[in-house]
Amino acid sequence: MVMLVGMVGIPAIAGAEGPGGSVGGSVTVTALVVTGVTPPATPPAAGDLVTVRVQVRNDLPRPVSALAVGIVGAVSAGATVPTVAAGQTAEVALPVWFCVAGPTTISATASGLDGVTPVAAAPGQSTIPVGAGPGCPSDPAVDRFPIRVSSTPDRSNPTPLDGRLADGVIHVFVDPTNPALVGTRISRVEFRLDGRALISDSSAPYDLARNRGRVARGLDTTLLTNGTHTVTAVVRFRNGAAAQRSTATFIVDNGPLAKSIRYSTSPDRSASQPLDGAALPGRQIYIFVSPSTPVVAASVYFFRNGRLIRVESRIPYDLGGTARNGDARAFTLTGLRTGTHTVSVEFRLPGGVTITQRASFTRP
């Protein structure tokens, strides 16, 4: 988070005490001044992700662009402010990992461009008491919350989802690289599919399609259009630290029309065939959608030739409805005109996401 304030709003700090630690005096240079380094109100434990706020003032009589603010002495990705006007102070909230217990001195750095000329501020320092904790992963450069995918419900042999070519049913989940964070530091993980809210999972493991016990439910990619899709995971923390966001883009390739809308001549749905392209004589048929594993659908809407026929809320999803014994109820073909008819299925997921599949059949 970046906030710009006037020059009078945040005076230069000289030896002032800050919450959780002491803040060293800011150093004025010709262009930029680090006027404050504010640690979290509650001292962190080793392995905690917390928010450190850094204030940087532009003392030039003209704007500074591409202001980069970072932290040295702890793990942080830093942040960039596009422009800071003359006399303004930028306050930047940085997510910072403290990996080692004991007093930790961090330095806030700031640099930017005066036109094409690089300018920088002398570092501002803060010493923060870090309590005992699980510590950080061995490699501080790794993605803390990678989005991974597995072909099996037990999440075995996972690979990064980003850049993956996917088909059929996949199991997508967030895998914190530091297991000690699970259940103690993370409040919840919010998943988005193509920018739309999907689910929020508050217990580990954090699965995009939720889970049954320790077994992950699958995402049936035949319900998505072929092409590029993006999953975003927003990780929120119990101590109120800045949320962390991970993103992965994958490509769905299930061939031409996904064969998820099927029909059978038997109520038990045996020997089913894809509905798309089928010729259906006779008086009745059993049309249904039954993914190999559950999808996260709040409800499924069936349409015939654009007219709503039925709404189903549990698997298996039957166009004619489901009997108490689990068999499909028949869809009557009598009275349908000769020619082509279209069945559309809308999967309406939590968060307003709607996935549509269509299949056309002919009536001889």
Image (cartoon, rainbow, N blue to C red):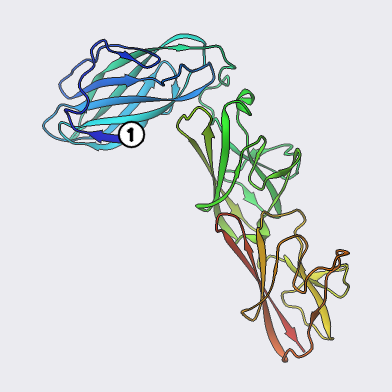
Q: From this viewpoint, is residue 78 visible?
A: no
Residue 216 placement: quadrant:
top right
Label 1: which residue? 80
Residue depicted at 64% across the width and 58% down the height: 253
Under circle 1, the secondary element is strand
| Quadrant showing the N terminus | top left
| In this rendering, position of residue 210 left or right of residue 75 | right
Q: What amino acid is at disc 1?
A: Thr
| In this rendering, position of residue 167 left or right of residue 239 | right
39 over 303 or under it: above or below: above
Q: From this viewpoint, is residue 106 visible?
A: yes
Q: Residue reaching furthest top?
A: 102
Residue depicted at 29% across the width and 11% down the height: 24
Residue depicted at 64% across the width and 41% down the height: 173
Residue 105 placement: quadrant:
top left
| Quadrant showing the C terminus | bottom right
Q: Position of residue 154 (x, y in %)?
A: 76, 39
